[in-house]
Amino acid sequence: MSQAPELPEAAPSGQVADAPKANWVDLYAPGPARPYLRLSRADRPIGTWLLLIPCLWALALAGGVGGFRGWDLWLALSCGVGAFLMRGAGCTWNDITDRDIDAQVARTRSRPLPSGQVTVRGALAWMAAQALAAAAILFSYNWLAVGLGVASLALVAIYPFAKRFTWWPQVFLGLAFNWGALLAWAAHAGEVPPAAVALYAAGIAWTLYYDTIYAHQDIEDDALIGVKSTARLFGDQSRAWLWGFFAVTLVLFALAVVLAHAGAHRPLAFVVALAGVWTMGLQMGWQMRHLDLDDPASCRTTFWSNRDAGLIPLPFLAAAAWLG
């Protein structure tokens, strides 16, 4: 495998090495706030998108079948804010637990904690502030959604440690990152039907796909320090596994559409919703054709492109509400 390029420790102003250049935090955020926003990955919004998208899938699929309701606009907007806050709190917790590991990895040693921009005490306070703000949003939902939101905290707490005891930490990330599919469906409909569970499972498979690609950026450093990942587990067989996760994602997403539309007798709406899943598959196929797992830059840009893949089904799912 080719040697990963050495990344800079950090620029004098404290930018994180793998953050997009000229991001809004580095350009416009007040100086004292920048280390905390970087701790929340606000300079890299892809994680917020990947946390939000399963919520939007659930709202669009549930609303497209049973009809949109007056509070759905609030649910969509609040899921967006909640995803930003909980992704920030989760990343802060992850960096607190991983600060010694991050200091040994070229891509991550410029993060605020290992580089000394933020203290552990300051990070804990920042994590608590974000979690409390997210809780204020959660408690505007129904009690089933509130219970699901509280239950998700166990997954968030466990995930940073998964790479220490299993070769499959991406499973734990998938369980946590796609919980919003269950929560948003519950907030919309007051129940979690089989279609929501299938959608959640599709999201987990999707996470295994994109986060295995992401993990290939650090595969050599991870091997040196003993951090486990599916990228290291699969090794030269990673492409075959990625195609498998690709297929499982689409099959489970299609199953969610079938279960949601079962008995609705709206064939045109059903076909349009399935077309959204198929079109997402086209974009993921394009990713696989262009992905070079031996090139960290290719892994990074392919990982980022999953925001676009996840957004593709949304207009199709929403359009199903007006058809049939």
Image (cartoon, rainbow, N blue to C red):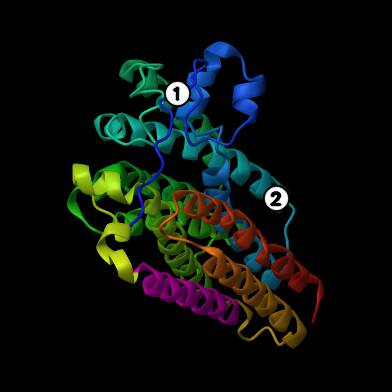
Q: Position of residue 6 (x, y in %)?
A: 39, 37
Kindly identify which residue carries mark 1: 10
Q: Which mark is residue 71?
A: 2
Q: Is residue 158 visible?
A: no
Which one is in front in this view, the residue at disc 1 or the one at disc 2?
1
Crowding near the residue tagged with mark 2, few <14, some 14–19, many ≥20 C-alpha atoms within 10 Å: few
Q: Is residue 99 visible?
A: yes
Under mark 2, the amino acid is Trp
Q: Which residue occupies the foreground of this view, 157 or 234?
A: 234
Question: Marks 1 and 2, how far apart in space?
Answer: 44 Å
Please name the residue shown 62% across and 56% down the image: 56
Number of residues whose C-alpha sits closer than 10 Å to that of mark 1, classed few (under 14), some (14–19) or many (20 or more) = some
Q: Residue furthest front?
A: 2
Q: Residue at x 74, y 84 (%)?
A: 266
Of helix, strand and loop, which one carries label 2? loop
Cβ atoms at labels 1 and 2 below 8 Å apart: no
| Point 46% across, 24% down: residue | 129
In the image: residue 63, left or right of residue 291? right
- Type of amino acid at the residue the image marks with label 1: Ala
Q: Is residue 69 magenta?
A: no
Picture coordinates of residue 87, whole percent (x, y): 48, 40
Give the number of the disc on residue 96.
none
In this picture, which residue range is highlighted in magenta?
238-259
SS label for mark 1? loop
Chief secondary structure of the magenta span? helix
